[in-house]
Amino acid sequence: MTERLRRLDDDALGRALTMTARDIEWPAAPDVVGEVYRRLRDHERHPSLARPRLSISRRRRTLLLVVAAVVLLAAAAVAAKVVIDLGALTIETIPGRPTALPSPVASGPTLGHPATLEEAEREAGFAAEVPEALDAPSGVWVDTAQEGARILLAWSADGVLPAIDGLPWGAVLYEFRGQMEQASKNVFMDGNTFEDAKVGGHDAIWITGEHELDVVTDEGTYARYRVTGNVLVWANDGIVLRLETSLDQAAAVRVAESILA
Amino acid sequence: MRSVEGRPLEDAELVDLARDGDVHAYEELVARYQAIAYRVAWLVARQAGEAEDAVQEAFVKAYYALPRFRPGAPFRPWLLRIVANEARNRVRSSRRREGLVLRAVAADPGGAAPSPEAAALEREDAQALTRAMERLRESDRLVIAYRYLFELSESEMADALGVRPGTVKSRLSRALGRLRTELETSGEMTR
């Protein structure tokens, strides 16, 4: 039976699928019209609750609002979530502490596959940003499985680049391109610092303390990683960059700004 | 359904109205596309509750993204892209995933029904195909569904998948190739 189906060419297999579609009994679709209407009306009445996808030009204002919101929320110990949406990467603040701290970044299946820098750029379709302040990366991975592309660069720890806790690396730079979400950070209001910063005039976010990074896998699910280093996130020319090191903020910003030099 | 001289408003007209803040116009778009949106979300999440949440969130996000919606572009694939992305965001738990279900075979009083043997053969084919679809990775499942289950055009597929139109055919062909591999696995499992 399946042998016969397997031998069909693409057109014939497509026709068989179209025939099959008529026999599928889909789960009953709920009527969401009323609920969507209610939420839109609520947002109109309380504009601060609306969180449309952000355009680049509005991010600065929003970042400031978000930081202010985090401070207020933390102070009030209110269990609410704040979301920053950078397209390929979102950052969510969550009350409490991380509940799961599994494997560290740069050691799992979502790295993509190892490549030379040139191969990674060719496959990802964009030029990787490499900080001039660092030597050539010790490891390069590329992943284009989802509707976007990401390149990960890692530098071995050495005398001037202390190891990130739990990792052999002194610096890990994730570069995401595309508007489809490829990763999501869970930053915890209890134990993390979360503040705005600048990288060469671009708005950036500086995060310290153990938190979580969810990366979309090839199957469209998420793999969760423990992040132990200090993280600087910013966007430059359509690419979202995430630099993890054990450096302090000023030193990390210097590394990041050497990309723009 | 609001209309102009008796005809329902086109998507583009409703989008223009919604962009100007007419929530009722947007309600009509929600009503028009909530069924296909839910099926897409369900195919990604394979869990009814997650799919419903994803659809609601996607419609809200899409409303606020309307100012950046390209005038004249088709609304449906743009919406489905947001829906699929939102559903992907929710596939985080280890909840049991639901499977595609085929309708019970109904007697056809019209007399044009295939012979019992042919009907049984079609039924087996359909079951093998749905089982193989379920085992595909989500991106392959979606590209096949867009083309053959929802019958989107290649141009709509490109918009819905967020890829260049020139790459749709090759993606579809690769997905069908992996479907054949899954059919082979299925054949071995049932031997």
Image (cartoon, coloured by chain):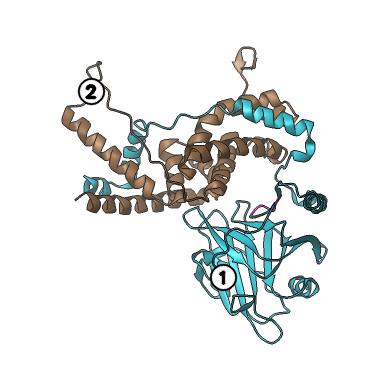
Chain colours: A cyan, B brown
**Residue that carries the numbered disc 1 in the rendered image:** A106
- Tell me where residue A216 appears, x and y as whole percent: 54, 56
| Residue A21 in the figure: left or right of residue B28 | left
**Which residue type does callout 1 highlight?**
Ala
Distance (Cα) linking label 1 and label 2: 58 Å
Helix, strand or loop for disc 1: loop
Depth check: give the residue in front, A148 or B131: B131
| Residue A131 in the figure: left or right of residue B179 | right
**Which residue type does callout 2 highlight?**
Ala
Can residue B125 be seen here? The reply is yes
Tag 1–tag 2 contact (CB < 8 Å): no
Q: Residue at x 68, y 64 (%)?
A: A241
- Tell me where residue B106 appears, x and y as whole percent: 27, 23
Q: Which mark, by number, is residue B113?
A: 2
Q: Residue at x 22, y 30 (%)?
A: B119
Q: Which residues are magenta?
A: A83-88
- Dot 1, how many residues are within 10 Å of its Cα: few (below 14), some (14-19), or many (20+)? many
- Vertical position of residue A255 compared to residue A183: above or below: below
Q: Residue at x 59, y 69 (%)?
A: A152
Q: Nearer the viewer, mark 1 or mark 2?
A: 1
- Vertical position of residue A203 compared to residue B113: above or below: below
- Dot 2, how many residues are within 10 Å of its Cα: few (below 14), some (14-19), or many (20+)? few
- Tell me where residue A32 appears, x and y as whole percent: 58, 29
Subunit that carries the residue with mark 1: A
- Tell me where residue A8 appears, x and y as whole percent: 27, 46
